[in-house]
Image (cartoon, rainbow, N blue to C red):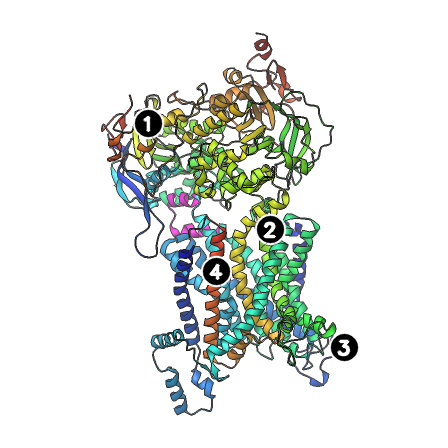
Amino acid sequence: MTDALRLEGLSREFPVGKRLFGKPKGIVHAVRPVDLSVEAGETLGIVGESGCGKSTLARMLVGLLPPTTGRIEIEGKPLDTADPAAFGKRIQYVFQDPISSLNPRKTIRQVMEAPLKRLHGMDRAARERRIAEIFDSVNLREEFLDRYPHEFSGGQAQRIGIARALAAQARILILDEPVSALDVSVQAQVLNLLADLKRELGLTYLFISHDLAVVEAVSTRVAVLYFGSVVEVGRAEDIFRAPKHPYTKLLADSAPVVGRPLSAPEGRETELPDPLNPPPGCPFAPRCPRATEACTGAMPALEPQTGHRVACIHPLG
Amino acid sequence: MGSYIVKRLLSAIPVLLGITVIVFLIMAMIPGDPATAILGSYATPENVAKLNRDLGLDEPLVARYFIWLGNMLQGDFGRSFSLNRPVLDEVTERFMATLILAGTSFVLCALFGIMAGVVSAARQYGWADRGITFAVLLGISIPSFFLGMMMILIFAVHLRWFPVSGMYAIYGGGDLADLLHHLVMPAVALSVVATGVVARLARSAMLEVLRQDFIRTARAKGVGEGRVVWRHALKAAMVSIIPVLGIQAGFVLSGAVYIEMVFQWPGVGRMLVDAILKRDILLVQGGVVIVAACYVLFNIAVDVAQSLLDPRIKT
Amino acid sequence: MKTVRLIFRNRLAAAGLVVLGIVVLLAILTPILPLADPDVTNTANRFRPVFAEGHLLGTDHLGRDLLSRLLWGTRLSLAVGFAAAVFAAVIGAGFGIVSGYFGGATDNVIMRGIDMLMAFPYILLALAIVAALGPGLFNALIAVAVVNIPFFARNIRGVTVGIAHKEFVDAARLAGLSHTRIILSEILPNVIPVIVIAMSTTIGWMILETAGLSFLGLGSQPPQADLGSMLGEARGALITNPLTSIVPGVMILVIVMSINLLGDGVRDALDPRLRSGALTRPRAATVVDRRAPVPAPRAEGVLTMTDLETQFHVGARVYRAVNKVSLHVAPGECLGVIGESGSGKSVTALSVMGLVASPPGVITGGSVRFRDAELIGATYGRLRELRGDRVAYIFQDPLATLHPLYRVGDQLVEAIRVHHRIPRAEAWDRAVALLKQVRIPNPESRAQSYPHEMSGGMRQRVGIAMALANDPDVIIADEPTTALDVTVQAQILSLLDDLRRERGLAIVFITHDFGVVAQLCDRVAVMYAGRIVEEGPTRAVLDAPAHPYTRRLIACVPELGAGRRRLEAIPGLPPAVDRLEPGCAFAPRCLKTEAVCVTREIGLAQAGNRAVRCLFPETDLKREAAE
């Protein structure tokens, strides 16, 4: 069986402090070479803190940002052109901020028609039918179609965003923090809707979030991102219960959980390393309680090749 | 900071070159040739050709530009035929007069504009705000040359408080008091529009800042309202006011042209208008380039002031 | 339509529109009005006064009819000013949009060119252009338009850059739209209001400028006259015959002023920020308009709120953000206030020290007592003494809540010195000590940093240090960790917990996160639609929630370690607090609703140390209290 999505050595660098002539002052490796695959029908969760490169990764996957190196394969076919329209039919994106992802001066109908017209060339009647179908599946009333985005609550706007992504008929959806801007009671509505759609339409998700509990609740597998690298990949039910990478453990221990006493999981007041001046070897080493001399040598690779993989010389458990 | 100033000065070089190119190209669009303009339409073809050769006008465009630029860099801006003296001398002398006028107006507009804006914002919808807003509206709507004429009529002709025109009294003047006496009316007339613009901008910048979270923090600390407005808010608002002051300096310099005409002030603006009407091209070229170059330097000073105020600007 | 209505609601703008309308109408009608020929000279008849026979406004220095010249001149000035504005707007906006949308090298080239034009004081450029093209009205028009292109280009570019980075543009790209289509259908509709605003605010300016060039003799050439050249010609006789100067001058003033008034109205109507009234300045303290008598406190505590009511008055609407809220906190205690967005939890917190933005906020009732002092309705001076000294705040986003242009050390020094008259050096030492207490590494050098040089976690530590500066009795923390990453959040929470134990601080902790409440707070109050629906010791409330909302909200929250699963959701949305129905606000979303739930007010039923506002609670609090 082919993977729905395959990334090989995908990376992205940003020059910092551009100069008129000559080389930039520094280069930030927002995403270091990443190899990942997503099976058809699964949900791969990606967690990480701000600045770990998760949004950069997502934008590369839909062609909004050309990668510096590496390749993307969708359903067995390579996609190396950075033309969003070419990506559009095969992979779609649901944005974090539901309101700002809708043009304030367009009706919802105009928003919904764009992908049907541009990507699939449907005529008017076909579009009408298709929109009705999609709206039904995301539990939105058709009377919403002639309204403007500011008339909707965050939860409704996010459903519209999902509906737009479905209209392109892509089978893979990149969900970039789709519920972070929503209140918990509405968040659950949207997460459940996503789960239903996936089952009914056989979709594949890449679900990006900073919220460990949400990722765990919706994902089949989870990849943990730290400082632009994947440090651990494993099944959702195992990865936070029995983390192998010390960073994953730190994340899991930091999440506020009802019934667990408050304790700072890190003794020292540590911070992310400076992206312009990254530490040698494993970027987590300076914060890691298990770090040894060897950790500052080279960035450890993800081992083993399949199953619960971890990039650490001194894994836990 | 030192290296930032050097960097900004270096970055001004292409801008200055660009200015010379633009001025040169505009002047090259002039139909007919300057030699005819200088010598008049009755000149013999031989004389015109000779003058063209003397002025270097028989060279191709690019070569002419570089000759002109090279001469300028050596301080040779050519000779004004209408005044029969070196362009540089005439422009420097006239520009000093303009600087006295425009500089005074600029200080007035910055001072009163910012104060009016802050008071207006701090008393939003109060009587002070309404009064200032109306005055500002009047100020930005009145043509400065018309205002100047009305001021002459009222304060010079009827009340006899100030002299009608000129920079110094013809007999017995020449000292600082005499200059200031002559300066009051033109400087005020020139600053009115700019004051209005600065006040408007300062008001909206202050209103914007006063809604920010850090103002709430200052209040939550127990900082008094006067300090909140004049220190916390004004300092943050200056970040958007300073660039506008830079632009206003250009407007004051521009408005000086009209005011110099109305008040017979012997500045560079009047010189330029006269030169245009007499088609004294070299004088126009030299005047424009020198004044524009000074303005570029002034804007660098504005940028430096901005970077001193705002630590977020990378220096 | 809405825009036109909004303009008319603004009386000044309407006046501007009416005056301008009359002037434009006169200008249009000029050719068919029974006027003397404006260019026929009659020197015998020069300088006739107003109301002279056959010359309503008199005559000028060549004996020409002033009224006729005025109207013809107005016609010309209006046409030229308007044409210059359209010309500059179209070309400038075109450059701006292309530059802002494509960015990169295109942007660089265009903007460097624009910068070059802006390097001239504008009149020099205009004079140079007129010098090259020769004096004349059309050339003056071109000169004025060209010098105004940079203004439009810069302005529109800035707006376009903002829009081009919006997510809906990315979405359009993914929907297969080409660049041209995105510019036309996504960018342009959002930019046009800005172009209209820029035009309406500059058209007056353009009329002034063309009049100015004519005044200098570089614009319209005799005998044709616009308002500027009329003024220029009249200047020679200013002292002897001021009338010929005043007439065209006043006309320019009237035109430009009415355009400016109208322009302001257009801007206010089209700018959504102004439309919502967001640009009003919050006062130093929230307005108090308390009609009912001050209620007596019903609980003990260092800080007690009793029946606090805070509303937002926006136009005719009244949003009841805080609706009879009573809370209390004792020294050393941490009270959690939990709720979703719009529940009124933050407004409750800000009401305590009068920090709710006013307008539109108004405290309309209730009492807040710090020890024995009543804070609602206290003088501003009294409030200011207590702010930051006895009751201190920690806010959500530490980048926005610290002043960007002051060093953090100075901000701490100020916090100390507004309440204690101590020398600066001593205050600085205290500030460094405070930074050390909140566990900032290298406090001496960090005190010299600006907020933008610090990470989010470090900035929030500064925020906490600032709150601690005067050793307050109460700290009100409004979602202090919401903007932070989980690992940093854990550090900050444990710091707060240590501090309150060491110092016996009373903390009111506003949050939306049950996990945080569970770990930090002794007691918790749950808010929904401006009211407290449940209150009690944290453990008891979390283990056995009494209000259906609390129970179901807890069920919504995915908890780490439970694996992959379907979440409970609460269908529907919280009610808008400007249209509250009688009875329980949660009733429309509740599974246990009965008719009685929405017929009358439901009180907060107290039982032991717990309370619930529900007729059919999930847990019988009376029995629980008895046990």
Q: Give amino acid for label 3.
A: Ala
Q: How much space separates mark 2 and mark 4, taking CA atoms?
A: 34 Å
In the rendered image, residue C494, in percent from the top left (x then y), is placed at 46, 26
Q: Considering the numbered disc 3 on the image, is that residue within a helix, a strand or a loop?
A: loop
Q: Residue at x 60, y 28 (%)?
A: C530
Q: Give amino acid for label 4.
A: Ala
State which region is magenta: C167-189
Q: Are marks 4 and 3 in contact (CB under 8 Å)?
A: no
Q: Residue at x 54, y 19 (%)?
A: C548
Q: Which residue is mark 3?
A: C52
Dot 1 crowding, Cα within 10 Å, few <14, some 14–19, many 20+:
few
Q: How much space separates mark 1 and mark 2, taking CA atoms?
A: 58 Å
Residue C179 belongs to the span the image colors magenta:
yes
Q: Judge whether A124 appears above or below B183 on screen.
A: above
Badge 3: chain ID: C
Q: Which dot marks residue B301?
A: 4
Q: Which dot marks residue A289?
A: 1
